[in-house]
Amino acid sequence: MTLAHSRQFSTSLNPINITSLSKQLIQLGRINNPNTFSDTTHHQQLQASSLISNLNNCTCLPQIKQLHCHVIRQGLDQSCYIITKLIRTLTNLNVPMDPYPRRIMNLVQFPNPFLYTSVIRGYAVQQNLSEAVTMYGSMRREGITPVSFTFSALLKACGSVGDLSLGRQFHAQTFKLSGFCSVYVGNTMIGFYVKCGDLESARKVFDEMPERDVISWTEVIAAYAKSGDMESAEGMFERLPKKDVVAWTAMVTGFVQNAKPLEAVECFDRMERSGVLPDEVTVAGFISACAQLGDSKYADRAVEMALKFGYSLRDHVVIGSALIDMYSKCGNVEEAVKVFESMKNKNVFTYSSMILGLAMHGRAKEALDLFHYMVTQTTIKPNNVTFVGVLTACSHAGLVDQGRQMFASMHQTFGVEPTREHYTCMVDLLGRVGRLQEALEVVQTMSVEPHGGVWGALLGACRIHKDPDVAEIAAKRLFELEPDVIGNYILLCNVYASAGDWDGVLRVRRLIKEKGLKKTPAVSWVVDEKGQMHKFSPGNMNHPMSDKIQGTLEELVERLNVLGYQPDLSSVPYNASDDEKRSILTRHTEKLALAFSLITTSRDCTIKIMKNLRMCQDCHTFMRLASEVTGRVIIVRDNMRFHRFRSGACSCGDFW
DNA sequence: ATAGGGTTAG
């Protein structure tokens, strides 16, 4: 038999013939690598195509193993082409590289660069840089020349663990070995630099690429957005000639990540107008923007939107989880629960969002029950966010012992290391019930360096329990960590004021002045049935219904007085006369918003008020009693959390 | 197959 013969017959050969033919050829010494023949034969690829499509449809390991047996029976276990595909499939199903995929690769006598690359890529996906590099080393030792995809896989590996310097070396080698930079390899390089946080180098690659596609653009746009530089992201986006749905989505979620929900909604509108249809990812981003806006008008629109594009909301785990978060943040935890219950697939995001939603609304028992269900009845593992939810729930319900227990088991039973957020919850938990010394101890003995949040929680607790001594300790550290956050100074002011220490109040005022800080003006707003927003600020009484609002408020105060309402004058951090304090209190913006809502809405309608600052003690009591005398449900969303007032009680249990 | 994805505190 000659090589000419074999080529002549190759059109009628099947893979088995080819492999055995190759073996014969090797025995005859005609070729020394069957891949030169069998792997490049178009015919064999056709023969193997059904095998490949079966591989692509594999959804679990047993299926692949079955196919692998088939491969062996067919004598294809020496085909780099087939084994490469097999390894890819295994990688995509997250099967660890060792031992199985690695073994079937080792069994191939004449590996080609693509086979090596698939294994390197496998290690990259599994974030195992050292094995990926070792694999590359043996490849070079065997004298196999890497292809550009090899460097893509290596760069991916470097990116997965953030090894910038090693990645740079591969970057240099890529040019040396493959001569030019394809769009594909260039995109991988951009991705690598982005993952390492080196935006400048990423941009340099982008600028120097001979050609770019929409993926190159989107990578850089998303990187700018993630780094908080929305201006650059927008600049790039405007220059992008053909914007596809992924690029638009990068912008929408970019705005969401940078807490610019209005811009996100605007961007979404623009996308629609330009004729690009959103997909699930876009809708999830939009829903997240709605959550930040905290308004049910947008919430309804998001749901409508998703339905319009045919996304079965409750089947999609990301959309469902986003909806739970959105409804919770819009004050409609009942609807959030409905979504949760109707979802078929749930993951840790779904549960964490639901637990947080319940905790946010003061439904601690349900939150804890849900957590218990999650860890005993499902295989879903709680993560650090889940525990933030659990601890928040404990703190809202004043469940000190249970909270402590949870905090301990978080680490011991579930292997979740406590972060500053968890310590913040613990300080909050202890501080709220007045155990300020214990809270202080937690801060002083925590395993990570305390941040502003921890000290802020302590200072907040001092405000509730009127403890200027601990407050001074907390404030000192807090002002070092967050010198420009005006809210911190106001908090300390409130502590001094509530303790009647007017010298202290003056000292803080002077400090604020020295730093040139400006007090954030309070504003409350409600949205009417037409979607119109009505804003209320304390000094600005020029709302068209101002007189009516005043009248309604006065009348309401009288009715509350009957129930024993006394204005809480310590809520006013000014050394003013009692009459002045009373007058200041009635001008608090959430009270104006309440009066407006009482006038303009029907009796069975839940009143929803948003506020940009934290509600004061007096307003809280006021709302509680108002819900009793008016028989209305009042929801106030301040900058901290939800308060749902009903029949004289608040969902937060008066701890906030 | 290299891009965009939802939950975190005072």
Image (tube, rainbow, N blue to C red):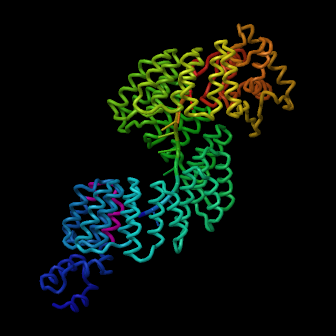
- Nearer to me, A19 or A179: A179
Query: Which of the two residues, A632 or A386, is positioned nearer the viewer here?
Result: A386
Range drawn in magenta: A49-64
Q: Position of residue A83 (x, y in %)?
A: 27, 67
Q: Quadrant of residue A69?
A: bottom left
Q: Nearer the viewer, residue A378 or A569?
A: A569
Residue A55 lies in magenta, yes or no?
A: yes
Whether A640 is drawn above or below A192: the answer is above
Residue A610 appears in the picture as rendered:
no
Q: Quadrant of the N terminus of chain A?
A: bottom left
Q: Image quadrant of residue A528?
A: top right
Say which residue appears at 30% left-offset and 61% top-offset: A133
| Residue A383 image point, x, y percent | 41, 37
Is A335 above or below relative to A628? below
Q: Assign the C terminus of chain A to one quadrant of the image.
A: top right
Give the percent coordinates (x, y) of residue A412. 32, 30
Identify whether A59 is placed above or below A314.
below
Residue that appears at 75% across and 23% down = A588
Identity of the residue drawn at 54% across and 24% down: A474
